[in-house]
Amino acid sequence: MSKSRTEAFSDGVFAVAATLLVFSLGTPIVNSGLSRALINEWPSYAAYAISFLTIVVIWINHHVVVDAMDHIDRPFLFLNALLLLTVAFIPFPTGVLAHYLQAGHDQQIAAFAYGLTMSAMAFAFSLFSLYARRFLRTPMPFDWLGFSTGLLLFPLAMLLALVSFELSLAIYACVTLFYLVLPIVRERVMRSRN
Amino acid sequence: MSKSRTEAFSDGVFAVAATLLVFSLGTPIVNSGLSRALINEWPSYAAYAISFLTIVVIWINHHVVVDAMDHIDRPFLFLNALLLLTVAFIPFPTGVLAHYLQAGHDQQIAAFAYGLTMSAMAFAFSLFSLYARRFLRTPMPFDWLGFSTGLLLFPLAMLLALVSFELSLAIYACVTLFYLVLPIVRERVMRSRN
Amino acid sequence: MSKSRTEAFSDGVFAVAATLLVFSLGTPIVNSGLSRALINEWPSYAAYAISFLTIVVIWINHHVVVDAMDHIDRPFLFLNALLLLTVAFIPFPTGVLAHYLQAGHDQQIAAFAYGLTMSAMAFAFSLFSLYARRFLRTPMPFDWLGFSTGLLLFPLAMLLALVSFELSLAIYACVTLFYLVLPIVRERVMRSRN
Amino acid sequence: MSKSRTEAFSDGVFAVAATLLVFSLGTPIVNSGLSRALINEWPSYAAYAISFLTIVVIWINHHVVVDAMDHIDRPFLFLNALLLLTVAFIPFPTGVLAHYLQAGHDQQIAAFAYGLTMSAMAFAFSLFSLYARRFLRTPMPFDWLGFSTGLLLFPLAMLLALVSFELSLAIYACVTLFYLVLPIVRERVMRSRN
């Protein structure tokens, strides 16, 4: 099984999962006052954006890992399948979260379920990238900051959801932004050093 | 992160978003008179066609931009993610527009929401292509006509939607046709000059 | 715009459209007697299979055409977009057909709408492949049989639907089988000649 | 028709079919007690995971087969289309199974329908891989164990479903795990021999 094949299939799952998120946004069926109905759906838009950008972040990191590898083996394919299983699952808790943020009840449970999926995904990605380090083409320093952020903050946000779902959602958004901004900052620092 | 990877993922999102538009067309459930029900859905078909061709246009321009680039960096990936986020969102306002054009009320708001998404997409594409100009392999004249058309006409059509949704939809259709026909005309002109 | 990009995007639309057909098969919600309900859905399975194989056939022919081309230009991209627009539309009339075959009324209209889409698709493919002949790498005999079959039989089946939807569906199935079997026969003949 | 094209289209169908499985998990609509509703959906999660991993397993084996081939011909494309038709169908019986496991009635029929699809898929894959052996680049030992497992155990589980759906589901899960673990074990054995 070649690296390029694995990437093609994985890219497909990432792209489809990200694009399917749009179905967590249902057409609001009202007899009048569509503008208010559309504005009231704002938690759905936020959930859509956070999930979409999270999937993009995992996709980028997936490629960084696979690019650095010399070759792949069967246990790696197995761990990759587990990771994709959690990624393809994301539209489900996103839809649940979007629905219950609007419904105005059970938001804590919905945010907890969302965090559980995100934590499972972060855990699957950790296994995936730890195993991948066995096949590195060139030695690479271990990215402690990036590694532990998701593995600590997603479970933390999941638990906090039971106290305050607003705080929990803010952490999900911040983790995603952190992963988008961190490599930009690092690129800047590296370039200014050279 | 290589250019080809970014293109493969982006192609996936464009292709899936375009194909998901078909779900804005619901099977009409009637007890009799299916032909009339199908004909009455014509605004949905128009919305489907405009959104589909708009996504094709953005996809073509996305490739023209990335092809001209020497390499990409992390901020570019971030802007690309924002662009894809707006593209993958298009099935939502398309479904809303299709529903309310048939429902016969709140069409203005639906056309406004559609225009808001299109304007956001045009804005994201402008940021994306302006930033990309930093990494051009060979200097390229700036395409003022193509650049400003979407950036001006989509917001204009969005605002006009509050007055007349028919006029607004006509402009969306014209902008899409303009972007499909403009490069054909340019290709002709260039060929006739050589 | 390179050929490979166009093929990647087109492949995406073909693959997604084919896979989305599964949603024309709704989970039957019954209180008892699931086996009967599943068996009664057989027209949906037939519609799924015919549409799936038709999309595979168009995909194969799409590649045969693009492979034979030397290069592509902008009007070709436009015709390709029109073809993909009809292909991505197929899940809609397939769902309508599946629903009304089971509902037991309006089957003629549903089969007519299905034939209209298939005819539009055959027409778009004809334009696409006729235009493509301008850019052939090596001269190729014109495939009269394959060309006229879809262009004549799909509209014929569409019109016959108004008289007998069973006959109409039989023709759709036969055309698809014809396109799957014809190249196999030709390959055999060619090989036996060499 | 080149091998790489066929793989690109097939990869697309596999990736989309796997990702669409998430729609077999509907957002539970309750007035209170979301946590209980989400926990009660566990059969849906199990069905999702089994189907997802089964599709990954078929995808891996699809590539192993195509990689070993020297070239492809038209009958092979036809058998590939039949295989993809069964793969793209999987979300339907998965959704039915998920619904009726929760509904608490007709589980036998739902598990039977699931097994019928899996058996059809295993049968299509057997035809596909038997035919492919005509075009092997280098002779390859026939994989009796892998070949007969799916072809015997899926129909067996299908029939057992009529007696005990729990036993049937356990077999589906075991077959999938078997196919994931078998190549890992083989890789280990082969490596320890060298």
Image (cartoon, coloured by chain):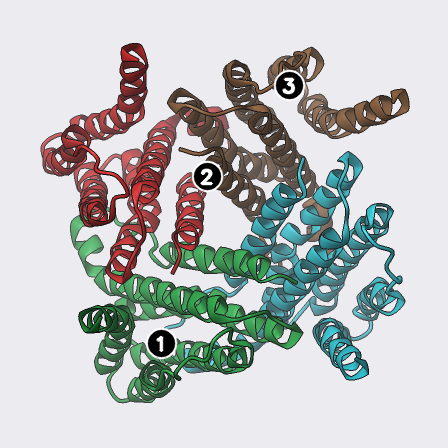
Chain colours: A green, B red, C brown, D cyan
Q: Amino acid at mark 3?
A: Gly
Question: Residue B12, position in %: x, y?
Answer: 45, 49
Residue projecting furthest to the front: A194
Res D112 quadrant in image: bottom right
Which circle, 2 or 3, is nearer the viewer? Answer: 2
Q: Is residue D105 visible?
A: yes
In-front residue for pair B14/A67:
A67
Position of residue D110 in the picture relative to residue C91 (left or right): right
Determine crowd level at label 1: few under 14, some 14-19, many 20+ residues with C-alpha closer than 10 A: many
**Residue picked out by circle 3:** C150
Q: Are marks 1 and 3 in contact (CB under 8 Å)?
A: no
Q: Please tell me the numbered disc located at residue B172.
A: none
Q: Mark 2 or 3 closer to N-term?
A: 2
Quadrant location, the C terminus of chain C: top right
Determine crowd level at label 2: few under 14, some 14-19, many 20+ residues with C-alpha closer than 10 A: some
Question: Residue C139, position in %: x, y?
Answer: 63, 14
**Residue picked out by circle 2:** C5
Position of residue D20 in the picture relative to residue B183 (left or right): right
In-front residue for pair A34/A144:
A144
Q: Are marks 2 and 3 on the same chain?
A: yes
Residue ID at (40%, 72%) = D30
Count how many numbered circles sit on residues in the image: 3
Position of residue B55 in the picture relative to residue C87 (left or right): left
Residue ID at (50%, 41%) = C8
- Dot 2: what SS? helix
The subunit carrying tag 1 is A
- Dot 1: what SS? helix
Q: Amino acid at mark 2?
A: Arg
How far is mark 2 from mark 3, CA to CA?
27 Å
**Residue picked out by circle 1:** A110
**Is residue C30 placed above or below D1 in the rendered structure?**
below
In-front residue for pair A135/C86:
A135
